[in-house]
Amino acid sequence: MFLYPMLNHALRLMNGDIITHMGFFISDLHRQIEQLHKEQFVDATAANIFTVYRGQGLSTGDFAKMSKIKGGLISFNNFLSTSTVRKVSLGFAQDATINPDQVGVLFIMKINPAQSTTPFASIVGISDFQKEEEVLFSMHSVFRIQDIKQMGENNHLFEVNLVLTADNDPELNRLTDCIRKESFPDEEGWYRLGLILINMGQFDKAEDIYQVLLDQRKDDQGQADIYHQLGRIKNAQGKYQEALTFYEKSLVIRQKTLPPNHPDLASSYNNIGNVHDSMGNYPKALSSHEKALEIRQQSLPSNHPDLAGSYNNIGNVHRNMDNYPKALSSHEKALEIKQQSLPPNHPDLATSYNNIGAVYDNMSNYTKARTFYEQAIQIAQQSLPSNHSDLQRYRKNLERIKNKK
């Protein structure tokens, strides 16, 4: 009774403390759902399609964002509790309308168990709430939004029709491939958790993990990787000299143990370049980024996102050096690669549009700057929380030049 809401709260907010301590429970719950799914739907066909419901409140901002992506995809971070009883779920949605800052939403979810992408199972015999006839989905279930419509005269109560995505959905495949790459599938255990904590901005917790791992790992590759991650942490904390020291320790080991065109060497040069850029050492930054780009051109496909990263970083350095034509060229190359390799609403695309806008801004071409800033905002509104610092920065950029000609 207590664990489930606490866990879902942690997953929604990505609370590293709770996730770290409850990792065993997350894994066990997922495995139980997976096992029940296999038992309950082993012979499922398209004729076994059924409907479940979920009622909840959404902030007016989140609801507005969802309304803009009708026909698109929506993902639930947490374990998703649904019911086969419409009346039960509608009650939860109606209760949410009491709060004037919320919209009550009744999700109506059509499920084809023969084509599902996420494990789910009926837990009627297990749940404490037998009357709810609960169906529980594992984390990261993805649905396509079919329709959104107001319920009766209440403009704070809506029903949203969803369809659970299938394995053959091309947009989903592209999105999940991108998510899979960003969730460190090749890493394991505490090392992987450290990477996730870095991406969550919980740097002190990540550093604690890597310091422990550093004492345990005595092999060259392991130590090089850990020094590299400690460098990322210090860089994110603004401790640039410490970051440089860790990155250089990692680079020395990698130069001794890896072939000269190995992608890990490119990562080292890339991150060393970022630190020099932050410290204002632009010639050193440019040299490091160009080494990273050269290795990536030799070792990666021409549309790999890491190549876009190199062009983006080179563009940033040129912009800082007031070399605006070179900056523009580099950022345009980065955008072209991202358009080939990322989903159309990926936040990295917003970054590129903003960077190109910033170069035009520096060149006093405010008409083009506005166009690119607006594109950055449009994408970021679809993919980032409304209070995200990147989205706020893009809006400030546009507001600052709104009346310039």
Image (spheres, rainbow, N blue to C red):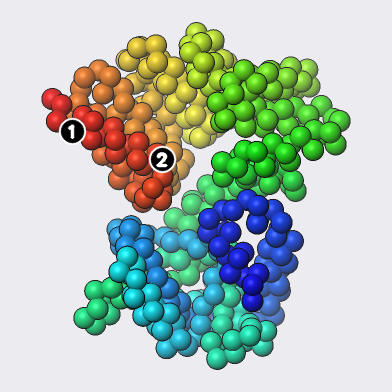
User: What residue lies at 38% left-to-right and 66% top-to-bottom?
Assistant: 58
Secondary element type, mark 2: helix
Relative image position of residue 26 (x, y in whole percent): 68, 63
Q: Find residue 396 and report its horizontal and vertical position in percent.
A: 29, 35
Could you tell whether 148 is left or right of 31 in the image? Answer: left
Q: For residue 102, what is the image quadrant?
A: bottom left
The quadrant in which residue 379 appears is: top left
Query: What's the residue at 43%, 61% (across, down)?
Result: 74
Residues packed near mark 2 inside 10 Å, few (<14), some (14 to 19) or many (20 plus): few
Question: Relative to 278, is 230 on the left or the right?
Answer: right
Q: Secondary structure at mark 1?
A: loop
Vertical arrangement, residue 270 with respect to residue 148, above or below: above
Mark 1 surroundings: few (<14), some (14-19) or many (≥20) residues within 10 A: few
Q: Is residue 316 left or right of residue 262?
A: left
**Mark number, residue 402:** 1
The answer to whether residue 123 of the structure is visible from this angle is yes
Is residue 161 at all visible to an observer of this figure? Answer: no
Q: Amino acid at mark 2?
A: Ser
Pinpoint residue 199: horizontal percent, then vertical percent: 57, 42
Relative to 355, say whether 155 is above or below. below
Q: Residue at x 73, y 19 (%)?
A: 249
Q: Earlier in the sequence, mark 1 or mark 2?
A: 2
Q: Confirm or deny contact between disc 1 and disc 2 (CB under 8 A).
A: no
Residue occupying image coordinates x 73% and y 41%? 209
- Residue 389: image tag: 2
